Image: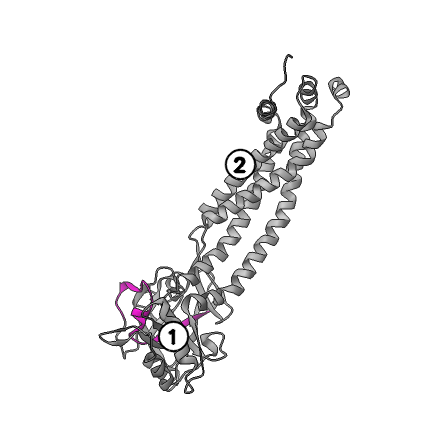
């Protein structure tokens, strides 16, 4: 053979020969692809739970929204405010106003038990008493079926997520709350926010049902602008008549999601790592089989002037391409199986159920494919090194 062979051309040629021989190793190659696809599907599927939960929380926090709790409370369940407290909060500087008054809703938060549609087991469902300004405080709040409850009546409206997950919440049904039976008159949406996990009613009616007097647990407000938050917060935290903590809604719901997202993410990576170990061994087996089946071919190429580096790179590239195929298949499987799958889980801060949809995002798909690529490279490295070190003369003598 005359003249030096371009290194890049060597890699292309060896890789081409390897891919053409795949039908002879179809079983091992398919096992590797399926194994890596399984790793990616599980990783992306589990992480999509955390992404969906986090999205539901994030969708609940508008940049110009704020929530006020009693000082020291880590959630609404452990908070408590009086009517004078809520009035001082509503009159604070920075609170947006309309023709009806300040956009401030003093709210009551209780838990009721309802059966899940899927299992029939009881779950903690949030029941929120609100004031009329709550409809303007929340972003994207709208009735999608039925009507809004009448103020002062024992009626409720239900979030879309709650209707999907829990029994007995369809329009026209009745739920037992306290000493009363309350009809469901409407279903509302908030664009995927955590409020869709809740049941809403008039705060005054809920106070009477639970003998809460004129007490509340939180106040949600809409500010004139995101920049008004610090002034609003300072006016409340420095007021000697109040003992409160003030958070932006986005910050509050981010904190509420931390425990669950950390738990799910950690679990997802642990499972993926364990499965990835098995997938690496599968890739090793495939590539060692490839080297064994192509011993004479590789030796012949070496004798013709192909460098050992080109052999190493081409075999790793073959393993990489198989892994990439597995990653794409696993990502596609995860997307079609999990994306927008609706479920509910416990919010450990409020001990109530939060409904949400799994979110298979482009970031998660990219992450899954990167995992697949790393598995392929790890699985191809040692077989590629072994192939490059094969003694040319003895390899040519093999049958």
Label 2: state its secondary structure: helix
- Looking at the rendered image, the disc whose residue lies closer to the viewer, 1 or 2, is 1
* Label 2 crowd bin: few (<14), some (14–19), many (20+), radius 10 Å: many
Left or right of 328 on screen, residue 126: left
State the image coordinates of residue 352 (x, y, percent, origin top left): 47, 70
Determine if residue 117 is in view. Answer: no
Q: What's the distance in space between the residues labelled 1 and 2, CA to CA? A: 55 Å
Observer-nearest of 349 and 146: 349
Observer-nearest of 201 and 16: 16
Among numbered discs 1 and 2, the one appearing first in the sequence: 1
Observer-nearest of 255 and 330: 255
Left or right of 221 on screen, residue 296: right
Q: Which mark is residue 231?
A: 1
Left or right of 10 on screen, residue 143: left
Disc 2 target residue = 325
Q: Read off the magenta span.
A: 124-148
Of the 4 image quadrants, the one containing the C terminus is top right
């Amino acid at each position: 053979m005359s003249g030096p062979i371009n290194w890049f051309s060597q890699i292309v040629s060896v890789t081409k020969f390897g891919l053409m021989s795949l039908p002879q190793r179809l079983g091992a190659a398919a096992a590797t692809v399926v194994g890596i696809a399984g790793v990616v599907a599980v990783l992306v599927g589990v992480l999509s739970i955390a992404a969906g939960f986090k999205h539901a929380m994030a969708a609940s926090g508008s940049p110009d929204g704020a929530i006020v709790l009693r000082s020291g409370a880590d959630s609404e369940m452990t908070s408590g405010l009086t009517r004078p407290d809520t009035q001082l909060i509503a009159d604070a500087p920075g609170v947006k106003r309309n023709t009806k008054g300040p956009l401030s809703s003093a709210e009551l938060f209780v838990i009721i038990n309802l059966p899940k549609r899927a299992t029939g087991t009881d779950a903690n469902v949030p029941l929120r008493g609100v004031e009329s300004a709550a409809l303007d405080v929340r972003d994207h709040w709208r009735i999608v079926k039925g009507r809004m409850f009448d103020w002062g009546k024992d009626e409720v409206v239900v979030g879309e997520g709650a209707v999907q997950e829990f029994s007995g919440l369809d329009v026209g049904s009745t739920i037992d709350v306290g000493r009363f039976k309350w009809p469901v008159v409407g279903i509302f949406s908030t664009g995927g926010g955590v409020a869709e996990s809740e049941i809403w009613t008039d705060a005054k009616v809920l106070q009477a049902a639970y003998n809460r007097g004129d007490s509340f647990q939180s106040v949600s407000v809409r500010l004139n602008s995101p920049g008004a938050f610090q002034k609003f917060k300072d006016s409340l935290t420095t007021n000697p008549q109040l003992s409160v903590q003030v958070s932006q809604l986005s910050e509050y719901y981010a904190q509420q999601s931390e425990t669950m997202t950390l738990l799910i993410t950690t679990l997802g990576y642990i499972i993926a790592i364990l499965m990835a170990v098995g997938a690496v061994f599968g890739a090793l087996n495939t590539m060692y089989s490839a080297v064994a089946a192509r011993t004479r071919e590789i030796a012949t190429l070496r004798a013709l002037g192909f460098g050992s580096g080109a052999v190493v790179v081409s075999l790793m590239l073959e393993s990489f391409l198989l892994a990439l195929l597995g990653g794409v298949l696993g990502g596609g499987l995860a997307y079609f199986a999990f994306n927008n799958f609706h479920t509910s889980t416990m919010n450990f801060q409020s001990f109530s159920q939060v409904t949400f949809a799994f979110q298979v995002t482009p970031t998660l798909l990219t992450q899954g494919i990167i995992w697949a690529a790393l598995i392929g490279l790890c699985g191809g490295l040692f077989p590629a090194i072994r192939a490059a070190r094969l003694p040319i003369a003895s390899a040519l003598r093999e049958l």
